[in-house]
Amino acid sequence: MIVLERRIPDQLLMYEALLRRMDREYGDIVLKYQNLKKGYYGELRADREWKDMHIQREHYLFYSFEAKNQFGHTFQMDTLFMCRHFILVMESKDIGGRLDFDDTTRQFTQTRANGEVLSFSNPIDQVLRHQAFVQDELMKIGVSLPVVPVVVITDSSTIIGSKSKEVSVFNITGLRSKLEKLFERYPQVLSNGQLGYVKDHFVSCYTKLPIKRNYPPLLLLRGAICTTCRKQMVHVRRCFQCVACGVKNSRGMYEAMHDYRLLYKEWITNSEFRDYMGISTVYTASKMLKRMNLPHTGANKNRRYFIPEDILERCK
């Protein structure tokens, strides 16, 4: 049973907004976006493997699980698999070439086809950290259950070279075999009711983490953007119109607010809205904000409006 569905990472959406609004193309931004997109597609590839297995045993799947511990440290896990025998903590990597893991130096390297060697943060250390978090949460509720960390490679062309002795590393096609071996190794520990209790605890642990807006200072287009020629649009009655090609867009305000939420923050004032959207009067801006029916706090000059994740759905 899927408890938490896979969602498009906020970081990926943020970089898409950057690409829409950059005054020119920045290679490092494009590369970061491509890597994030590739990683997300790799996670979807892993999800298809889970779906194809048709696991008959009672289980729960958490995709894109996020949480904080008591010290405020954050955790982002690709996949949690819970059953009555064990919990599997899975980290997915979509990296090609040859991959080597060194338990002594804690290095993780990629060797490309042209011989270039690149070093990345070690997914072994990452998944071990996630394992420790899950174990701590189980201790809090008095449950003893094996927690198994694994790293799966979702690029079928990847060659796995030197492996870690601490954590299993394998291609995603080996997931079925790995699960079968784990079921053979670990006997049933929990009843269905106890497993449900563990599931409910981790549901309560889930905390959607804030967007990491760690992009460099850039000159970005503001307000409603023409999808045809990428020029800033002007407000004309209840829609926006491109000054260059004349195209009108009734969704422009919602699309602009969607990007504002990703690139800047979730809350906006009337003054900030006017500056961002190119609106000249407080009255017009107030009418537009009211039309979107946004949650708000405060009154008059102290009023702030909250931009929800589903802002694009409000213009239908």
Image (cartoon, helix red, strand yellow):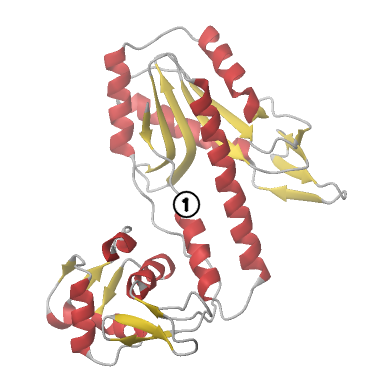
> Left or right: 194 with respect to 119?
left
Mark 1 = which residue?
Answer: 9
Identify the residue at horizontal 71%, vertical 42% (top origin).
107
Can residue 289 be seen here? yes
Image quarter where the N terminus lies is: top left
Identify the residue at horizontal 44%, vertical 69% (top origin).
263
Amino acid, disc 1 = Pro
Can residue 142 be seen here? no
Q: Looking at the picture, how far across and down is residue 86, in whole percent?
A: 45, 18
User: Which one is in front, 108 or 173?
Assistant: 173
Q: Looking at the picture, how far across and down is residue 113, in whole percent?
A: 85, 46
Image quarter where the C terminus lies is: bottom left
Task: Sort mark 1 into few (<14), some (14-19) or many (20+) by Cα contacts within 10 Å.
Answer: few
Q: Picture quarter containing residue 32?
A: bottom right
Q: Is residue 12 above or below residue 83?
A: below
Q: Looking at the picture, how far across and down is residue 57, in whole percent?
A: 42, 14
Identify the residue at horizontal 43%, vertical 34% (top origin).
133
